Image: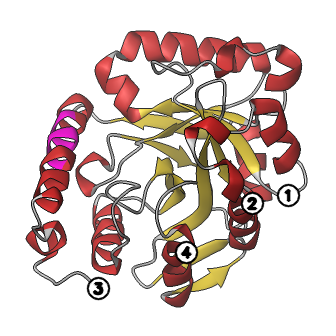
Amino acid sequence: MKLDFHTHGKLAKKLPFSTAYTDWLFDEARRTGLDALCLTEHFNTLQFDELYGYLASVSRRDGDTLLLENDLRVFPGMETDVAEGGHILSIGPMEAILELNRRLAPHKEKEGFLPFASLMQLFSDYPVLVGCGHPFRTGGHVPELPGEQLRHLAFLDLNGKDLALNRERTEKLTYALGQRLNIPVVSGSDTHQAVQYGCVSTVFETGCTTVAALHEEMTAGRYRIELSENAAFQVRTACLLKRSLKEIHALGGDYVSILTKEAIA
C-alpha cells in the first residue's frame, strides 16, 4: 500500500471548498500511483465539515477509511496548530475527527491555539493516531517540549517540502527525534495541489483499512520511504502553482476551471 501521510483537500484554508477541485486532487493522487492518503486538512480551514460531508457522500466506508470510486483510500485526519508553535497530525475514524474539530472550535485563531499538553489530553479521549507534522520547520517548537509530553506522539512526519529544501538536515533531525522517542518516522508530501503528490511516500508491505492496523504496521517497521528523484522540482513547481492559483482567485478568476475545465461546484 503506497500511502501519503500528510495531504490537504483544498488549495488554501481561507479559500472556499470546491468539490470539483477536491475531485481533481484525488484523481491526480491515484494517477501518481498512490493507493491511499491521510487527509490531514487544517483544523481551521473554511468548510471543514463540508469537505468531509462531501467525501462521505461519494465514497463507501471500509473500516476507518473512505474508499472512493477510483479506489483511492482516504484515512480521515486533521492538522492542528499548537500554542508553542508547530503542527500536530491526527488520523482516525471520520466521526472522531469531526467531533474533535467541533470541540476545537474555540481555539481556531492564533491567540486561542491550545498548548500541546492540552491538545494531547483532548486527543486521548478518541481513537486517533497522533503525530508531529514537519517537526523541524521554522517556527515549530514541538521537539523542544519535555519528553513526558512528547511520549503522546505515535509518529513523526518526514515532510516532502522540508526534504526538498534541505534533505540532509531534515532526515538527520527527524530520524534522531524518532529514535529518541522510539516512534516510527513516516512520510507525507504536505501537498495542497496535485503537483506535489509522489514527491515522497510510505510504502507498506500490506494494505490497511483501520487506524489500529496502520499503527501496527508502522510500529513493526513493515514499510519503506520512497523519495522521488524529482522531489525538489515538484515542490518548487507546486509552490509556484499555489501562489499563482491564489492570485487568480484574489483577482476574481476561477482557478478551479483553469485546472479542471469545470465550473466551481
Judging depth in this view, the residue of 101 and 198 nearest the camera is 101
Judging depth in this view, the residue of 140 and 155 nearest the camera is 140
Q: Residues within 10 Å of mark 3 (few under 14, many from 20)?
A: few
Residue 43 is a magenta residue? no
Question: Of callouts 3 and 4, which one flags the residue occurring earlier in the amino acid sequence?
Answer: 4
Disc 1 element:
loop
Q: Residue at x 58, y 54 (%)?
A: 43
Answer yes or no: do the residues labelled 4 and 2 have beta carbons within 8 Å? no
Disc 2 element:
helix
Name the kind of residue labelled 3 in the image: Ala
Decide if residue 148 is on the left or right side of residue 140: right
Q: Magenta residues?
A: 236-241
Q: Quarter of the image containing the C terminus?
A: bottom left
Answer yes or no: do the residues labelled 1 and 2 have beta carbons within 8 Å? yes
Disc 3 target residue: 265
Disc 2 target residue: 100
Q: In which quarter of the image is residue 89?
A: top right
